[in-house]
Amino acid sequence: MTEWLSASEIAAAKLPGLPSARSKAAALVARARQEQPHLTRERAGRGGGYEISVEALPQTARDELRRREQASAQAGREADEAARQIELRAADKRQMAKSATV
C-alpha cells in the first residue's frame, strides 16, 4: 500500500474527508508537520516539499485508498490472466495448425 502522499497526490486522489484543492492539501501537510512531525518527511525529487504518512489521514481516507489499491491490483491480475489465456489459445492454434500439416 502507498505509505506517503504529497499534497498534489492528496488533492488528485479526491479521498473522502480530504481537500481536493492542492493549496488546501498543502495546508493539511503543513499542519501535520506542526502537529505530527513524525508522520511527515521531506519529499525526495524535483520540487521538494513534504509528504504525509497515510497513517496521519482520517480512517475513511485510508480505507478508500486501500480499496482503490486492492481494486487496481485485482484489475492487474485479471489483465495478466486474460493475456495468459490469449497466449494459450494462440499456442493451441499453432499446435493444431502444425498437426494439420503433418
Image (cartoon, rainbow, N blue to C red):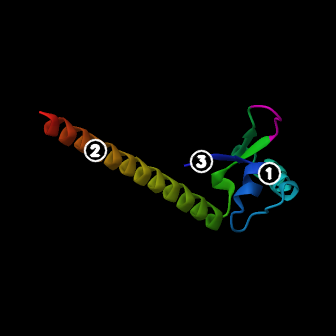
User: Which is nearer the eye, 4 or 47?
Assistant: 47
Q: Position of residue 37 (x, y in %)?
A: 75, 45
Q: Position of residue 63 (x, y in %)?
A: 57, 64
Q: Which mark is residue 2?
A: 3
Q: State which tag comes first along the sequence, 1 or 2.
A: 1
Magenta-drawn segment: 45-49
Q: How many other residues sit within 10 Å of disc 2, few (<14), some (14-19) or many (≥20)?
A: few
Residue that numbered label 1 is attached to: 29
> In what element is the residue under mark 2?
helix
The residue located at (67%, 63%) in the rendering is: 58
- Apparent side of residue 54 relative to residue 40 in the rendered image (left or right): left
- Report the mark closest to the observer, 3 or 2: 2
* Few, some or many residues within 10 Å of mark 1 (<14, 14–19, 20+): many
Q: Residue at x 28, y 47 (%)?
A: 89
Q: What is the crowding at mark 3: few (fewer than 14 residues within 10 Å), some, or many (at least 20)?
A: few
Question: Residue 12, position in %: x, y?
Answer: 74, 56
Determine the residue positioned at 50% across, 59% down. 71
- The C terminus lies in quadrant: top left
Which amino acid type is shown beneath numbered disc 2?
Leu
Tell me which secondary structure the magenta stretch mostly adopts.
loop
Q: Amino acid at mark 1?
A: Val
**Residue at image mark 2:** 88
| Residue positioned most to the left | 102
Q: Which amino acid lies under the numbered mark 3 shown in the image of this protein?
A: Thr
Residue 50 position in % (x across, y down):
78, 42
Q: Nearer the viewer, residue 60 or 94?
A: 94
In this view, 66 is above or below 5: below
Above or below, 20 relative to 43: below
Q: Is residue 48 magenta?
A: yes
Q: Earlier in the sequence, mark 1 or mark 3?
A: 3
